[in-house]
Image: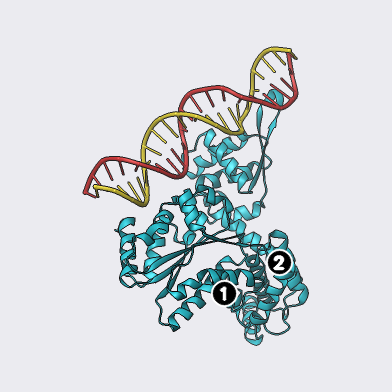
Chain colours: A cyan, B yellow, C red
Amino acid sequence: MSDELDVVDDIFERAVRSKGLFKDRNVLRPDYVPSRLLFRDEQIITMAQIMSPLLKGSRPSNLLLYGKTGTGKTAVAKFVLKRLEEKASSRGMRVKFVYSNTKMARTVYRVLWEAGRSLGLQLPFTGLSIGELFDRILSFISRSSLSVVLVLDELDFLVKNFGDDLLYELTRCNERLKGGSVTLIGISNDLKFKEMLDPRVLSSLSEEELVFPPYTVEELKAILLDRVKLAYREGVVEEATVNLCAALAGSEHGDARRAVDLLRVSGELAEREGAEKVTERHVRLAIQKIEHDRMIDALSSLPTHEKLVLASVLKVGQADSTGEVYSEYVDLCRRVGMEPLTRRRVSGLISELDMLGLVSANVRSKGRYGRTKKIALTVSGDLIRSVFREDPIVGVLFR
DNA sequence: CCTCCACAGGAAGCGCAGGAGT
DNA sequence: ACTCCTGCGCTTCCTGTGGAGG
């Protein structure tokens, strides 16, 4: 007992004594917008040019921003529009910029609701039809003759799940407005989503397009060094550490968000350890931790029956037929008091687990003895056990 | 060469939940 | 409050198939 107390005491003592490695951790958060954006001058200038008619009181072209994740689309959009808004208000113009991440909002209703609310409109979170909501927002814009710039982030998500009806209405709503205007800025990392749009919507939305290329490793390095100065105390992060973060994120597809994330997690691990510096070793640990967390997330969010199937695979060990897994699965279902699903469905669930990368399932023919899948775990059994133990239904199998 | 095992995986349809229109 | 519509998870029924053993 007293040993444990000593250990705990030691941790606290070290936390108090050390000044900490971070100067400002917020700088490494994913939603942080830096005061200067490196290697995006071209995009910033072009976007500013496209938006500038607003300052003369006319409506600019709609704009579409493309690029893979972590290439600075959102940051550039927020950066330019914030300055535009400031400039406009200093000249007494009524320009308002509204940002909505459609993936976070999840539904068309919420996108509109959030947009309306950030315009300063009181709206009920439920009860209105989409049309009614839309009309209220438009009439508010008309009445106060606002020039609105609406940014729709992760637009591919919205279109994939809810079609382009909202976009259709938005692209032609200027005809209905008596005062004010609405300018659209769509952000997407999927080029293919254009195919899902009505040609009229597409031509209106993509009056202008801006492409964001991935960052090179050198660029990532410069971006990280820039953040290191703000985020960490002097001399805490070695250059080799930054290089490794940049190289790892660069080998992916030049994803700056990943690079910054890696740098932050590395630092947190180093700090927790009570280390004086963030080294390459911490980066390697950080990769593992990020991957580990991702796995835990994937495992714990699995539906009950998929958990049961995975538990069956774990129990059987190397399974060389679907039937083997299925009969184990039926057995486990009985033990937890669940009605088992059919073979066909379980076969499908195994395929889903395969796609999630939790299991490898390959079709093999054993001649006379049929054709089936060879199924093996690709995650550590201990990890599965520790996650499933916490499950209210499947948990009993692991205690 | 044919057969036949033990499934894979497509097609259709069912019941349910949740969201939109009225 | 009510229907109507749609998407989703699931079942049922089905046809297709690589190759060991006859």
Element assignment for label 2: helix
Q: Amino acid at mark 1?
A: Val
Residue drawn at point x = 49 percent, y = 57 percent: A205
CA distance for labels 1 and 2: 27 Å
Q: Which chain letter matches label 1? A: A
Do callouts 1 and 2 point to residues on the same chain? yes
The residue labelled by disc 1 is A33
Residue drawn at point x = 48 percent, y = 71 percent: A53
Can see residue A8?
yes
Residue drawn at point x = 51 percent, y = 44 percent: A305
Q: Amino acid at mark 2?
A: Leu
Drawn side of residue A105 relative to residue A364, left or right: left
Q: Nearer the viewer, residue A337 or A225?
A: A225
Residue A360: percent from left, percent from top: 67, 43
Which mark is in front, 1 or 2? 1
Can see residue A10?
no
Residue drawn at point x = 71 percent, y = 70 percent: A219
Q: Is residue A166 above or below residue A96?
A: above
Q: Quadrant of the N terminus of chain A?
A: bottom right
Q: Which mark is residue A285?
A: 2
Number of other residues with Cα within 10 Å of mark 2, as a class: few under 14, some 14 to 19, many 20 or more: some
Residue A359: percent from left, percent from top: 64, 45
Q: Nearer the viewer, residue A227 or A19?
A: A227
Q: Nearer the viewer, residue A354 or A14?
A: A354
